[in-house]
Image: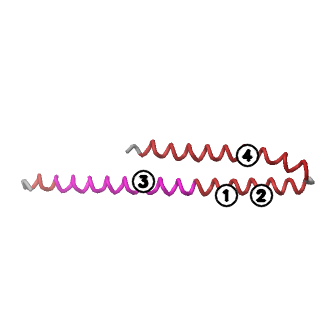
């Protein structure tokens, strides 16, 4: 599996969610200002923006954990291959044939 490609998909997903949330929040601010007084509208818009950022950060945290898990798994596979390569090299020096 191409880990670099998988990482870019996750990051792209996070960015799309962030942009969609930003567009949603920007559309809410004028709607709140119409019926309520300005202070209350600003308070509601701020709360909506804060909630959106909170949700985005949870998505980023999840993606970060997945990336770290994949990197750990790849590191273990590379380590095992290097370990086996070292064993084969030692056997070749000794002249063993298994």
69 is higher (above) or lower (below) than 3:
below
Q: Which mark is residue 70?
A: 3
CA separation, marks 3 and 1? Answer: 25 Å
Whether residue 72 sits left or right of residue 44 in the image: it is left
Secondary element at tag 4: helix
Whether residue 69 sits left or right of residue 29 in the image: it is left
Characterize the magenta stretch by its predominant secondary structure: helix
x, y percent for residue 52: 70, 53
CA separation, marks 4 and 3? Answer: 33 Å
Quarter location, residue 13: top right
The answer to which of marks 2 and 4 sits earlier in the sequence is 4
In the rendered structure, which segment of residues is drawn in magenta?
60-88
Q: Nearer the viewer, mark 2 or mark 4?
A: 4
Give the labeled residue for mark 4.
24
Give the labeled residue for mark 1.
54
CA separation, marks 1 and 2? Answer: 10 Å
CA separation, marks 2 and 4? Answer: 13 Å
CA separation, marks 3 and 2? Answer: 35 Å
Q: Which mark is residue 47?
A: 2
- For the point 46% across and 56% down, the residue is 68
Identity of the residue furthest to the right in this view? 37
Q: Which quarter shows the N terminus?
A: top left
x, y percent for residue 55: 65, 56
The answer to which of marks 3 and 2 sits earlier in the sequence is 2
The answer to which of marks 3 and 1 sits earlier in the sequence is 1
Whether residue 20 sits left or right of residue 85 in the image: it is right
Q: Nearer the viewer, mark 3 or mark 2?
A: 2
């Amino acid at each position: 599996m191409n880990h670099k490609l998988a990482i870019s998909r996750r990051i792209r997903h996070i960015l799309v969610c962030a942009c969609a949330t930003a567009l949603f929040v920007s559309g809410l601010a004028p709607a709140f200002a119409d019926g309520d007084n300005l202070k209350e509208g600003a308070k509601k818009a701020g709360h909506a923006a804060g909630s959106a950022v909170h949700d985005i950060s949870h998505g980023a945290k999840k993606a970060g954990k997945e990336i770290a898990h994949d990197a750990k798994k790849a590191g273990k596979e590379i380590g095992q291959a290097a370990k086996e390569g070292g064993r084969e090299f030692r056997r070749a020096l000794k002249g063993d044939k298994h």
